[in-house]
C-alpha cells in the first residue's frame, strides 16, 4: 500500500473531577454543567479504540498502523499478529497516516494537519533516531502522496501555487531540496493514482464529481500529459487506477455502461477497456494487485456490507475467500511476499481492527484487538436492514439497531442518524460510544440511506442533485412514517442527528418535521447554501457546485436560498444542539454561528458547542465533552 492514508474520527478521552468543567479550548453556550455521576457512568464508553492498516514493511513481516492510546491518533509499529503496538509518533495533533519507503523501509512518510484545518503537511520519520523532517511548505494543503516503485520519489498534490488548484509535485524524501512542481493543473479534484513499474509515468485522476472523472498519463520527468479515458456523452466515474505489472495496461474501477463500478483493464496503447469483474451487481469499492501480478483482492459493497473477494488474474476466476463476520472490509494491502494480504475489518461487535489473510493456507490472523472499555462486545447489538419505498416509490433503506427488549420493554425512543457526503453511505459497523444510547438509554438508532447515497448505482447518486435537493428530506419523512407503524418504536419520541451534510439534513428535517420531532443535533452542518458555497475553501468550491448547484445562477441561487435552514428558521419549534469546529475548511464556522443566532432571534432553544482547535468534526479529547453534552441533551429533550 503506497498511498498515505488520512484518518478521521479518532476516539479520545478527557478526565473530569467533581462536576465536569468545560475544557479551555471549548466554547459552550446554553449547555448545563456536566454532573460527575454522568461522566462516571459513561466512562467505559469513552474508551473504545480502533486500528487502521497503513503499510507493510518491505523487508519484514511487520506493519505500520494508526491507532490511539493517548489524546490523538498516532503511528504504531506491530511486528507480529497480536503483538504489542509500539508507538512511533507522539504529537498533540492526530497523525493522518503513513507508509514505509517501499524498498528498504529505512524511513517512512506521514501526513498531519493542525487544528483540524486540513492543510496537511508531509513529513519524513527516521526510525534510527526518531528525527522528523518537514517535506512540504508548512502552509498549503498537500495530499495523496504516492511512492514510486524504486522508492526514490514521492508524487503528491499541493495547493501552494494559488491556494485553489491541486498541482502535481515530485520529491525525493531523502533530500527535501529536490521538491519540484511537475505539473500545473486547474481544479481542486486532481489526485495522484500510481507510478508505472519503471517510474517513467504517473496516472493522474481528475475528479469532477462522484459521477464524473478522467484519467491521464503524465511523464514523470517533463509533466507532459495525455488523456487516457475518453470524454463522451456518458459521464463516467474512474477511480483507483493501478498499473498492471507488464506496464502495458492499467486496472481501474469504472461505471461505464453500468449502474455500478466494475473492475476493468485498460490497454494503455489502444485505450481498449476489458471488464474483469462484471458479474457482481454491486460497486467494487477497493482492490489491490499483488506485487507479482497474479492475484487481485477486491471488496464489493453488497447492500452496504463490505465483502472480500479474490481473483486469479491469469484464469479470470475467483478464488476461495474467507468467510468473515458481517461488516465492512477495507484498506487492502499486499505484503511483498505476495502471500499476506492485510485488511481492516469493522463489525457491529468489534471495533475496526487489522487482520491478514495467508493466501496459501487461507488462515486469517488478527494483528490488533482494540479495547472496548471493558465492555463485552458479544452483547453489542447487530443491525437489521429495512427496505422502504419513498413518497415517489424510489427505494430507500436503513440499518436499524434496536435495544435489548428484555432490558428495555415497551416502545423505544428513536435517534435518526443521517450520514454526510451527501454521497456517503451508512453501513453496518461498530457503534463505539453510540452503544451507550442502545445499552444504557434504550434508544433505537436508525441509519438511513436516502436517495443520493452511494452504493446503489450511479443513477441513484444523482437523485438529490440541484433542484431535487428537498427530495432527500422527504425520504426522512417516509422513515418517520415507518417508525409510526413499528410497534416497538415510539413515534412521539424521535430525534435527528447528523454531521456535515447530515448536519444540514438534521436542520432541514427540523424545519419540515418540527411537529413530529422532539429535537435535532447538527454537527458542522450547512445552514445556508449560498454562504456555504461562497465561503468554503477555494479548492473545493467548484466540486461542491456540481452537487448542490451553482449559486451564481440566479434561478439556482433563489432555490438554494429558499430551501436553506436559516431561511426557514421560524418553522423550527423544538430544541437544537449545534456543534462546530472553528477551523473547519469545508463548512465554515459562520454556518453554525448564523444558525444559532437565527434560532435565538426567533426565541428558540439552542445549545452551542464550538472547539477552537478543531475542524470538520472533533477528533481530539473534545469529543468526550461533546458526547457527554449530547447525552444530556437527549435525556432532557428526547427521553422525557
Image (tube, grey):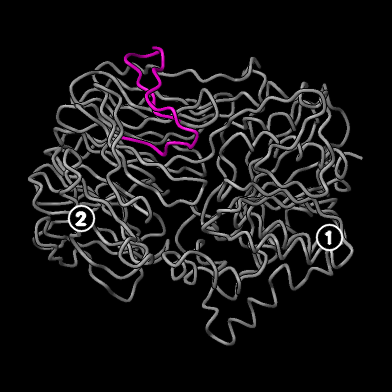
Above-or-below relation of 414 to 430: below
Residue 458 point in image, percent of width and height:
45, 61
Q: Which residues are magenta?
A: 74-98
The quadrant where residue 316 appears: top left
Residue where numbered disc 1 is placed: 514
Circle 2: element type = strand
Q: Is residue 256 visible?
A: no
Q: Residue at x 48, y 31 (%)?
A: 73
Residue where numbered disc 2 is placed: 203
Residue 109 point in image, percent of width and height:
28, 36
Upstream in the sequence, badge 2 or badge 1? 2
The quadrant where residue 453 appears: bottom right
Q: Residue at x 36, y 50 (%)?
A: 138
Inspect the magenta stretch and tell me whether residue 97 lies in it. yes
Q: Nearer the viewer, residue 573 or 419?
A: 573
Circle 1: element type = loop
Residue 397 point in image, percent of width and height:
62, 50
Above-or-below relation of 482 to 632: below
Please give left or right for residue 297 compared with residue 510 in the image.
left
Above-or-below relation of 237 to 109: below
Q: Given contact means CB atoms under 8 Å apart, are the residues at marks 2 and 1 in contact?
A: no
Amino acid at each position: 500500500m503506497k498511498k498515505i492514508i488520512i484518518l478521521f474520527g479518532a476516539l479520545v478521552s478527557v478526565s473530569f473531577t467533581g462536576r465536569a468543567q468545560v475544557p479551555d479550548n471549548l466554547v459552550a453556550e446554553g449547555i448545563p454543567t456536566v454532573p460527575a455521576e454522568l461522566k462516571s457512568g459513561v466512562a467505559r464508553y469513552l474508551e473504545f479504540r480502533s486500528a487502521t492498516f497503513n503499510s507493510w514493511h518491505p523487508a519484514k513481516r511487520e506493519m505500520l498502523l494508526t491507532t490511539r492510546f493517548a489524546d490523538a491518533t498516532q503511528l504504531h509499529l506491530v511486528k507480529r499478529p497480536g503483538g504489542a503496538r509500539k508507538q512511533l509518533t507522539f504529537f498533540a495533533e492526530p497523525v493522518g497516516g503513513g507508509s514505509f519507503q517501499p524498498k528498504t523501509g529505512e524511513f517512512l512518510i506521514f501526513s498531519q494537519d493542525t487544528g483540524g484545518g486540513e492543510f496537511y503537511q508531509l513529513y519524513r520519520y527516521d526510525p534510527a533516531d526518531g528525527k522528523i523532517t518537514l517535506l512540504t511548505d508548512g502552509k498549503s494543503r498537500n495530499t495523496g502522496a504516492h511512492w514510486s516503485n524504486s522508492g526514490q520519489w514521492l508524487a503528491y498534490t499541493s495547493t501552494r501555487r494559488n491556494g485553489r488548484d491541486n498541482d502535481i509535485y515530485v520529491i525525493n524524501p531523502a533530500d527535501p531540496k529536490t521538491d519540484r512542481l511537475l505539473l500545473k493543473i486547474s481544479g481542486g479534484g486532481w489526485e495522484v493514482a500510481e507510478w508505472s513499474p519503471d517510474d517513467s509515468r504517473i496516472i493522474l485522476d481528475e475528479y469532477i464529481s462522484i459521477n464524473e472523472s478522467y484519467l491521464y498519463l503524465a511523464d514523470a520527468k517533463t509533466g507532459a500529459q495525455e488523456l487516457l479515458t475518453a470524454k463522451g456523452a456518458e459521464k463516467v466515474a474512474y477511480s483507483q487506477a493501478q498499473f498492471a505489472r507488464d506496464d502495458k495496461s492499467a486496472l481501474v474501477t469504472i461505471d461505464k455502461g453500468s449502474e455500478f463500478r466494475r473492475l476493468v483493464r485498460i490497454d494503455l496503447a489502444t485505450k481498449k477497456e476489458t471488464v474483469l469483474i462484471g458479474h457482481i451487481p454491486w460497486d467494487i469499492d477497493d482492490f489491490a494487485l499483488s506485487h507479482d501480478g497474479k492475484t487481485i483482492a477486491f471488496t464489493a459493497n453488497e447492500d452496504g456490507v463490505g465483502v472480500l473477494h479474490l481473483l486469479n488474474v491469469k484464469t479470470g476466476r475467483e478464488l476461495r475467500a474467507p468467510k468473515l463476520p458481517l461488516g465492512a472490509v477495507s484498506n487492502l494491502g499486499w505484503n511483498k511476499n505476495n502471500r499476506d494480504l492485510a485488511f481492516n475489518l469493522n463489525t457491529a461487535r468489534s471495533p475496526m481492527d487489522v487482520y491478514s489473510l495467508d493466501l496459501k493456507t487461507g488462515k486469517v490472523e488478527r494483528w490488533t484487538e482494540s479495547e472496548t472499555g471493558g465492555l463485552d462486545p458479544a452483547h453489542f447489538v447487530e443491525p437489521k436492514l429495512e427496505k422502504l419505498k419513498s413518497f415517489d416509490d424510489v427505494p430507500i433503506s436503513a440499518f436499524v439497531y434496536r435495544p435489548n427488549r428484555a432490558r428495555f420493554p415497551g416502545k423505544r425512543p428513536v435517534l435518526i442518524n443521517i450520514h454526510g457526503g451527501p454521497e456517503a453511505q451508512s453501513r453496518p459497523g461498530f457503534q463505539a460510544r453510540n452503544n451507550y444510547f442502545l445499552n444504557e438509554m434504550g434508544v433505537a438508532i436508525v441509519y438511513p440511506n436516502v436517495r443520493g447515497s452511494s452504493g446503489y448505482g450511479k443513477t441513484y447518486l444523482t437523485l438529490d442533485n440541484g433542484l431535487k435537493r428537498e427530495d432527500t428530506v422527504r425520504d426522512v419523512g417516509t422513515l418517520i412514517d415507518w417508525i409510526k407503524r413499528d410497534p416497538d418504536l415510539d413515534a412521539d419520541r424521535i430525534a435527528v442527528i447528523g454531521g456535515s451534510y447530515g448536519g444540514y439534513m438534521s436542520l432541514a428535517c427540523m424545519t419540515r418535521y418540527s411537529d413530529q420531532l422532539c429535537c435535532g443535533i447538527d454537527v458542522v452542518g450547512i445552514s445556508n447554501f449560498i454562504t456555504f458555497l461562497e465561503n468554503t475553501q477555494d479548492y473545493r468550491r467548484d466540486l461542491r457546485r456540481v452537487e448542490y448547484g451553482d449559486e451564481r445562477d440566479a434561478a439556482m441561487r433563489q432555490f438554494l436560498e429558499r430551501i436553506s435552514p436559516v431561511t426557514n428558521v421560524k418553522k423550527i419549534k423544538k430544541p437544537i444542539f449545534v456543534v462546530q469546529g472553528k477551523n473547519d475548511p469545508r463548512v465554515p464556522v459562520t454556518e453554525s454561528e448564523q444558525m444559532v443566532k437565527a434560532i435565538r432571534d426567533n426565541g428558540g432553544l439552542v445549545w452551542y458547542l464550538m472547539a477552537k482547535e478543531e475542524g470538520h468534526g472533533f477528533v481530539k479529547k473534545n469529543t468526550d465533552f461533546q458526547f457527554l453534552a449530547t447525552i444530556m441533551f437527549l435525556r432532557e429533550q428526547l427521553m422525557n
